[in-house]
């Protein structure tokens, strides 16, 4: 009989994460590795002392944590010892593996045996080298046993279960609930409706993470008057952790009968309950269910089967498993509050009804609300903490604190901790590891599973399942319990709610460190020796300071660079810094350098004998070191996106434990060693294959795991035999994403290949497929499985380049299809009923894109039945279909976005007729679109908010008069017109009285309209951009333009000076190449101006620099390449200026007087190339322009600049230095000169994050090479470019 073991200390009990499972796994390892231990003569010292480990393990709490500090330290010491023992065992196992592999690959000759025998007596044995470690470990074990007795820790049976949470009642203060009206209305329809049901009662599950407001919503429903009137009997039960059918049934009985009766057993109780419920319409709320056992539910539900039709049972739960078992595939998933609702809830609990009285608090309040990420529990808790506090420092303090650092987690962590308590021990371990994931970090499921696997968390001796299968199951269980969430519209990506992230940090303890938290935890002042797992958020430039402390962290197992999965940025880290850091970390099991800009892998990585996981994806490495093949424990190697990696080490096949090798988007498919298909452990070479060798491809296809989520195959035209694919039986592979690509080239050999048979043989399992992409298919017809409704999960289909197909497959039958993209089907002329199938066509389709169909002529899908096709279509795009002339569709009531490009005006006219709800219209290259046709189209655009017109070269005016336009374009907010060569003006008749205007229009952009001459604009315009309109003469606001906030004028040579720059509300002004602009008047009226840029305006002679100190909001200022501008008064600048570009004026920078820059200035670009001769040869001539606050300095076009060793020493905050001698690339008319930069500012180099020098001497290049004198100073700079 199993004992329920826990620690008794006389102190408050709480939990300790995954200690017990860690030690248990170690004991199993000790048992498994007896042979290794004996071979090193260690069994008597370590194995036979394992009884101590087992005893200590029995003392570890499975779901409790003592708060006694001494016991905490004892537990942590035990876990540290467990890590140390595990490292020793792994070293022994790896050394044994090394000898085994060596014996397999190199038969030992008699001479070698003799030499080994002769010399072995002079070599220290491995066991001797391990003796000191083992003695140290056994000593610590004994110390812990002794300390256990001193602390009074004892093993006891049983232990009373603590209650999961406080009981909740049905009472509710409805007016205090914010943001749940929509949820309430939707669920009321379910409660009061009479939907078909297989039994007399229906279940309404409300699912969501802890604190999301499930109970609150259930209370709102329970207390609603319509609900009270609709149901004859009601009952509310708070179930919580202990699902006791007797107690629950008793509460239900008391609720409906109104009296307390005693029953001897459950049978008598349920019989009485059934008698009272029979024939009655009944509402039951089961709040906070944790049990997932179907038998619990079946027992409880026995009295409910004779209730009246329409009875309902609301259950609230954090888990999706029970609703799924009860047949609810789509329970009501309660979402987070919107930002506005969240802010209102927070403000109410903070006791502030009007933030106008506390303007400084509102900014902090907005940030606190963002931190809570829409979770009502957190909003109420943090709001209540600030109640009656109006001191700004209190709000800032709360904002800066991590929630897990607040006293008792601010009441939030304990609430979420209930979900953690309910996890099995193995899931607690996996969840705690997720504390390494940064907040808001988007990750892929398989990435996390591979990390768990590498850390050894997925070992399970009681099952034959693979570790990958175990990882999949564990991930799905954590997902079902709301520990992870899907990224919206990205089903393959996941994220943790910020508060779940806080919870993981809270439970993980002192063995984990995440460097984005180092300021809060102040990790640099703690002992780095104790950390075993580390992650860091990738910054653009990763510094020496960030990693210096980890030179002491030689027990570290995990070194994770964390670039966001949805980003494309690269990150810089010096190769010297990387090598120096990794050299100190010999025990690493997980190493990720993904997306770091490194060109080589340090040699020391080949010596990391414990390494299981190595991620080098999207780095710039060109090769792997030869000693890399000594990584016998390596399970996962990821080099996807390493485009420069062109070969593998010669002994690559020595990696016999390699299970996952990801080579997507590399050139390695042609460089695979011949025996790689024989690597017994290798499960996935990649899910992305290029067919180069037929036998290799078939082997790869055969070895795909059944749970493989995604498959990409390119080069299918090179496959030689359909029979080979048929024998693989791909229909048994449960694939969710399947992309297959043939070559787009035609040849004789390919024409003999029956490609429709190939495509038929590639049919995957129908239950799992969600995304299908077919490119350059050469068959004349599609096999029947394309469009088969049995693919009920298929949500996205893309077919591109079926050059021989005359008809589209019946995709309208796919019941779940949401996105459809069809391209380059050259032979398709008619799209009709064959595309639709039978019944309602495309019932769920939201986005349809049909592109590059140059032979397409007719689209006719009319059936005469409203809603029979495209009932959910929201976005439609037709691109480059020049021969499409006939479009006949039913109404598209939900269509909101319409893009048309490269087709005739008849298509536009037909579609606006059936899509009256479109809010965003984009048209380009529409032939036949004259003024008259466009004005007729405008009549159907009453709902349109955004219009973009591009390359419609027959339009001269968009409307006859603004008065007429205002009658139809009643909602137009944004108008963009690009590349319309004949457009002269917006309206044929310009009105100046300000009446009948387009009052909704806020944004207007005109780009490259070569003949556009003038426009009168109304006062409601807020953003105006005019670019490359060489003929425009006049832009005016007859009524003042007092709402204009942003003005951008670029390359409008003929535009006359006007009053545009006199608008006081302007926040952004960017003017470039305005030839007729001669004068900038006073700036004092621009009190809201934040960004001012004036460039390449050759006629401006003066600038009111004296007004700059009065621009209190200005943060960005650029005045450049205005060679007539003569300014004597530069010297005092805007008080909040942070970014400045200056130079290329009449007077050289060196002749500017002493400057008084504000301390806020951190980014400075200085330009040479003035009208007068530039004389700057050294940095000291620029020092008067260089405030000590600078972090970024960029020097452009100082073509006589020779030395920068002097004049920059005072820039102690500088992080980025760039010197470009030529500014030819900026079209300033200055020709390049010979390179002359000869030195660098040595005092600054060690603190720089980036250094860029373009235009230096050969001697200088030599100095900065690896052999040069500057190398010790620049080798730690993350990004260096010198040429």
Image (tube, rainbow, N blue to C red):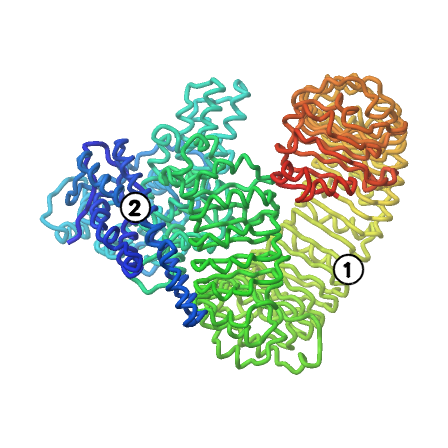
Mark 2–mark 1 distance (CA, rounded to whole Å): 62 Å
Considering the image in quadrants, where does the C terminus appear? top right
Tell which of 244 and 719 is nearer to you.
719
- Residue at 49% x, 63% y is 736
Q: Position of residue 367 (x, y in %)?
A: 51, 30
Q: Secondary structure at mark 2?
A: loop
- Locate the N terminus by quadrant: bottom left
- In the figure, residue 460 lies in which quadrant? bottom left
Is mark 2 in CB contact (under 8 Å) with mark 1?
A: no
Which residue is tagged 1? 904
Q: Is residue 774 above or below residue 263?
A: below
Marker disc for residue 422: 2
Q: Residue 219: name its quadrant.
A: top left
Q: Please indicate whether residue 164 sits to the left or right of residue 186 in the image.
A: left
Is residue 1102 shown left or right of residue 500? right
The dot on residue 69 is none
- In the rendering, at what x and y percent does residue 652 appear? 52, 64
Name the spot of residue 930 as percent of width and height, x first: 83, 52
Q: Is residue 1057 left or right of residue 1207?
A: right
* Position of 964 relative to 27 (above/below): above
Residue 29: % across, % down: 30, 56
Nearest to the observer: residue 631 or residue 1279: 631
Nearer-the-camera pick, 1021 or 456: 456
| Comparing labels 2 and 1, the label whose residue is closer to the camera | 2
Mark 1 Cα-neighbour bin, 10 Å: few <14, some 14–19, many ≥20: many
Packing grade of label 2 (10 A; few <14, some 14-19, many >=20) is some
Q: Is residue 285 visible?
A: no
Q: Earlier in the sequence, mark 2 or mark 1?
A: 2
What kind of element bears circle 1? loop
């Amino acid at each position: 009989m199993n004992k329920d073991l826990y620690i008794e200390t006389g102190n408050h009990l709480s939990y300790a994460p995954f200690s017990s499972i860690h030690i248990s796994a170690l004991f199993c390892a000790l048992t498994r590795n007896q042979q290794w231990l004996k071979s090193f003569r260690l069994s008597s010292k370590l194995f036979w002392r394992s009884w101590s480990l087992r005893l200590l393990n029995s003392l570890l709490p499975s779901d409790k944590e003592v708060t006694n500090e001494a016991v905490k330290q004892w537990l942590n010491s035990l876990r540290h010892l467990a890590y140390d023992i595990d490292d020793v065992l792994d070293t022994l196992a790896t050394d044994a593996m090394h000898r085994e592999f060596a014996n397999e690959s190199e038969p030992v000759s008699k001479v070698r045996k003799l030499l080994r025998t002769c010399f072995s007596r002079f070599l220290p044995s491995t066991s001797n080298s391990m003796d000191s470690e083992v003695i140290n470990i056994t000593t610590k074990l004994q110390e812990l046993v002794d300390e256990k007795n001193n602390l009074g820790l004892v093993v006891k049976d049983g232990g009373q279960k603590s209650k999961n949470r406080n009981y909740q009642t049905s009472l509710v203060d409805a007016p205090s609930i914010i943001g749940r009206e929509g949820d309430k209305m939707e669920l009321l329809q379910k409660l009061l409706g009479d939907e078909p049901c297989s039994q007399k009662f229906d279940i309404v599950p409300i699912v969501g993470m802890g604190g999301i407001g499930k109970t609150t919503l259930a209370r709102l429903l329970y207390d609603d008057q319509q609900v009270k009137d609709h149901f004859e009997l009601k009952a509310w039960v708070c179930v919580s952790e202990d699902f006791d059918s007797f107690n629950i049934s008793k509460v239900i009985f008391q609720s409906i009968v109104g009296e307390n009766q005693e029953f001897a057993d459950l049978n008598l109780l349920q019989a009485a309950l059934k008698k009272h419920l029979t024939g009655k319409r009944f509402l039951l709320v089961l709040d906070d269910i944790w049990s997932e056992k179907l038998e619990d539910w079946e027992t409880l539900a026995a009295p409910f089967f004779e209730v009246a039709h329409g009875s309902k049972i609301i259950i609230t739960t954090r888990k999706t498993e029970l609703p799924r078992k009860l047949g609810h595939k789509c329970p009501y998933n309660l979402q987070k509050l919107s930002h506005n609702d969240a802010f209102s809830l927070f403000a109410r609990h903070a006791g502030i009804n009007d933030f106008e009285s506390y303007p400084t608090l509102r900014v902090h309040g907005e940030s606190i609300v963002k931190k809570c990420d829409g979770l009502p529990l957190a909003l109420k808790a943090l709001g209540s903490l600030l109640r009656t506090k109006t001191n700004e420092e209190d709000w800032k303090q709360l904002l800066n604190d991590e929630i897990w650092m607040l006293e008792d987690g601010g009441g939030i962590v304990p609430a979420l901790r209930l979900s953690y308590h309910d996890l099995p021990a193995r899931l607690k371990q996996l969840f705690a590891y997720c504390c390494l994931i940064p907040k808001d970090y988007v990750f892929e499921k398989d990435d996390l599973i591979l990390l768990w696997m590498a850390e050894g968390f997925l070992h399970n001796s009681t099952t034959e399942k693979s570790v990958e299968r175990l990882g999949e199951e564990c991930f799905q269980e954590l997902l079902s319990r709301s520990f992870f969430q899907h990224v919206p519209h990205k089903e393959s990506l996941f994220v943790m709610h910020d508060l779940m992230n806080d919870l993981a940090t809270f439970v993980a303890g002192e063995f984990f460190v995440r460097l984005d938290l180092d300021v809060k935890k102040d990790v640099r002042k703690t002992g780095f020796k104790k950390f075993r797992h580390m992650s860091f958020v990738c910054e653009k430039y990763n510094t020496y300071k960030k990693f210096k402390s980890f030179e002491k962290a030689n027990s570290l197992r995990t070194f994770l660079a964390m670039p966001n999965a949805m980003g494309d940025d690269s990150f810089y880290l010096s190769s010297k810094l990387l090598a120096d850091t990794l050299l100190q970390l010999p025990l690493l099991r997980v190493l990720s350098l993904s997306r770091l800009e490194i060109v080589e892998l340090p040699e020391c990585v080949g010596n990391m004998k414990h390494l299981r996981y190595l991620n080098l994806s999207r780095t710039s490495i060109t090769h792997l070191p030869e000693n890399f093949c000594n990584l016998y424990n390596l399970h996962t190697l990821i080099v996807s996106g390493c485009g420069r990696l062109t070969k593998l080490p010669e002994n690559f096949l020595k990696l016999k434990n390699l299970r996952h090798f990801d080579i997507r988007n590399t050139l390695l498919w042609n460089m695979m060693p011949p025996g790689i298909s024989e690597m017994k452990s290798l499960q996935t070479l990649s899910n992305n294959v290029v067919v180069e060798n037929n036998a290799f491809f078939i082997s790869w296809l055969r070895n795909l795991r059944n749970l493989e989520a995604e498959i990409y195959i390119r080069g299918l035209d090179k496959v030689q035999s359909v029979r080979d694919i048929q024998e693989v039986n791909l229909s048994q592979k449960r694939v969710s994403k399947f992309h297959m690509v043939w070559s787009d080239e035609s040849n004789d050999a390919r024409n003999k290949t029956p490609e429709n048979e190939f495509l038929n043989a590639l049919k995957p399992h129908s239950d799992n497929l969600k995304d299908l992409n077919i490119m350059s298919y050469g068959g004349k017809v599609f096999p029947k499985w394309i469009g088969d409704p049995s693919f009920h999960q298929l949500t996205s289909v893309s077919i591109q380049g079926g050059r021989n197909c005359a008809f589209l497959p019946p995709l309208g039958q796919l019941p779940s299809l949401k996105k459809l993209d069809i391209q380059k089907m050259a032979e398709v002329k008619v799209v009709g009923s064959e595309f639709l199938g039978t019944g309602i066509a495309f019932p769920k389709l939201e986005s349809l894109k049909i592109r590059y169909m140059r032979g397409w002529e007719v689209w006719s899908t009319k059936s005469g039945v409203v809603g029979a096709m495209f009932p959910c279509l929201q976005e439609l795009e037709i691109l480059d279909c020049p021969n499409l002339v006939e479009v006949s569709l039913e109404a598209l009531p939900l269509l909101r976005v319409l893009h048309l490009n490269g087709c005739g005006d008849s298509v536009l006219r037909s579609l606006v007729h059936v899509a009256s709800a479109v809010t965003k219209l984009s048209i380009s290259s529409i032939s036949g679109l004259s003024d008259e046709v466009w004005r007729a189209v405008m009549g159907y655009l009453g709902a349109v908010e955004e219009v973009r017109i591009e390359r419609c070269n027959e339009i001269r005016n968009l409307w006859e008069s603004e008065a007429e336009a205002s009658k139809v374009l009643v909602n137009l907010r944004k108008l963009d017109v690009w590349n319309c060569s004949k457009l002269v003006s917006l309206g044929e008749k310009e009105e100046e009285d300000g009446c009948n205007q387009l009052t909704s229009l806020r944004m207007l952009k005109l780009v490259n309209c070569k003949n556009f001459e003038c426009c009168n604009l109304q006062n409601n315009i807020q953003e105006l951009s005019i670019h490359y309109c060489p003929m425009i003469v006049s832009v005016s606001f007859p009524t003042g333009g007092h709402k204009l906030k942003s003005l951008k004028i670029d390359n409008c040579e003929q535009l006359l000076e006007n009053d545009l720059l006199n608008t006081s509300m302007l926040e952004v002004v960017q003017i470039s190449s305005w030839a007729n602009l001669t004068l900038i008047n006073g700036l004092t009226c621009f009190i809201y101006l934040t960004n001012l840029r004036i460039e390449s305006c050759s006629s401006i002679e003066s600038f009111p620099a004296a007004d700059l100190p009065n621009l209190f909001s200005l943060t960005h200022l650029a005045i450049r390449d205005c060679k007539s501008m003569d300014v004597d008064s530069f010297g005092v600048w805007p008080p909040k200026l942070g970014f400045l570009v200056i130079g290329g004026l009449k007077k050289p920078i060196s002749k500017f007087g002493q400057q008084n820059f504000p301390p806020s200035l951190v980014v400075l670009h200085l330009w040479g190339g003035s009208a007068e001769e530039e004389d700057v040869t050294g940095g000291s001539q620029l020092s008067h322009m260089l405030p000590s606050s600078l972090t970024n300095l960029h020097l452009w076009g100082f073509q006589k600049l020779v030395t920068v060793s002097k004049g920059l020493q005072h820039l102690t905050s500088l992080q980025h230095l760039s010197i470009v001698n030529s500014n030819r690339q900026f079209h300033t008319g200055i020709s390049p000169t010979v390179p002359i930069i000869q030195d660098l500012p040595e005092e600054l180099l060690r603190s720089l994050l980036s250094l860029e020098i373009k235009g230096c001497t050969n001697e200088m290049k030599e100095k900065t090479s690896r052999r040069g004198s500057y190398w010790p100073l620049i080798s730690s700079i993350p990004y260096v470019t010198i040429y």
